[in-house]
Image: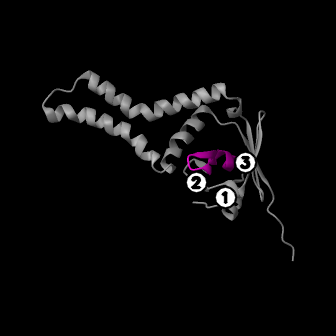
């Protein structure tokens, strides 16, 4: 009987600011109770817009401005964080090469090399745009599905991930 390990699958890509930003915003929905924290600001903005109506006062420009800031709080803070990290952290600069094999996920860039064994991966989730590989409840490696499709390895990666993780 000849049992062979799956061949390693490699992917190299250099995520843009917008890819990292969209991945960060998308990742919020998988973060359990943190979704509630992110929902507080839009709800506060809605409250600020509705309150004058209930107390019989006219809506003022400053109410609208404060409500807009509340609605945009999470995207603005996320954009600022992504920009700051990409600018000041050498570990956040690509291109990144991911190699998935029977041992785990190996990540390499010009500044680091890292291996995460399959046992260290909590779960893997697939959204419309990304494959999220969770290494903690609030931290995930985000791989754009577009990059996997362009390199023709999406199905291989999904198959390998399903063999070793909780994949949804």
How far from the left and from the top, in percent, is residue 153?
Answer: 72, 53
Please, what secondary structure does the residue beneath circle 2 have?
strand
The crowd level at tag 1 (other Cα within 10 Å; few <14, some 14-19, many 20+) is some
Q: Earlier in the sequence, mark 1 or mark 3?
A: 3
Marks 2, 3: nearer the viewer:
2
How far from the left and from the top, in percent, is residue 124?
Answer: 61, 55
> Quick one: which residue is furthest to the top in this view?
61
- Which mark, by number, is residue 61? none
Q: In which quarter of the image is residue 60?
A: top left
Magenta stretch contains residue 76 = no
Left or right position of 34 against 125: left
Q: Earlier in the sequence, mark 1 or mark 2?
A: 2
How far from the left and from the top, in percent, is residue 145?
Answer: 63, 48
Residue identified by numbered label 2: 126
Left or right position of 140 against 67: right
Q: Marks 2/3: CA distance?
A: 17 Å
Residue identified by numbered label 1: 158
Q: How was this image coloured? A: one colour
Left or right position of 111 against 72: right
Q: Marks 1/2: CA distance?
A: 9 Å
Quarter that holds the N terminus: bottom right
- Which mark, by number, is residue 151? 3
How far from the left and from the top, in percent, is residue 123?
Answer: 61, 56
Which residues fall within the magenta stretch? 133-151
Q: Do the residues labelled 1 and 2 touch (CB within 8 Å)?
A: yes
Q: Which of marks 2 and 3 is nearer the N terminus?
A: 2
Please give the name of the residue rendered at 32% of the width and 36% of the height, measured from the top-left corner.
Answer: 44
């Amino acid at each position: 009987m000849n049992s062979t390990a799956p061949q390693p699958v490699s992917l190299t890509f250099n995520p843009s600011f917008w890819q990292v930003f969209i991945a960060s915003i998308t990742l919020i929905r998988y973060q359990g109770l943190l979704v509630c924290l992110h929902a507080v600001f839009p709800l506060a903005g809605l409250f600020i817009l509705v309150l004058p109506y209930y107390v019989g006062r006219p809506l003022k420009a400053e109410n609208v401005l404060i409500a807009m800031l509340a609605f945009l709080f999470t995207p603005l803070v996320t954009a600022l964080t992504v920009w700051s990290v990409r600018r000041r952290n050498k570990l956040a600069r690509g291109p990144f090469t991911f190699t998935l094999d029977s041992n785990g996920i190996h990540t390499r860039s010009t500044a680091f090399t890292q291996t995460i064994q399959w046992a260290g991966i909590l779960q893997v989730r697939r959204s419309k745009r990304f494959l999220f590989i969770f290494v903690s409840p609030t931290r995930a490696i985000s791989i754009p599905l577009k990059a996997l499709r362009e390199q023709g390895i999406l199905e291989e990666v999904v198959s390998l991930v399903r063999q070793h993780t909780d994949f949804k």
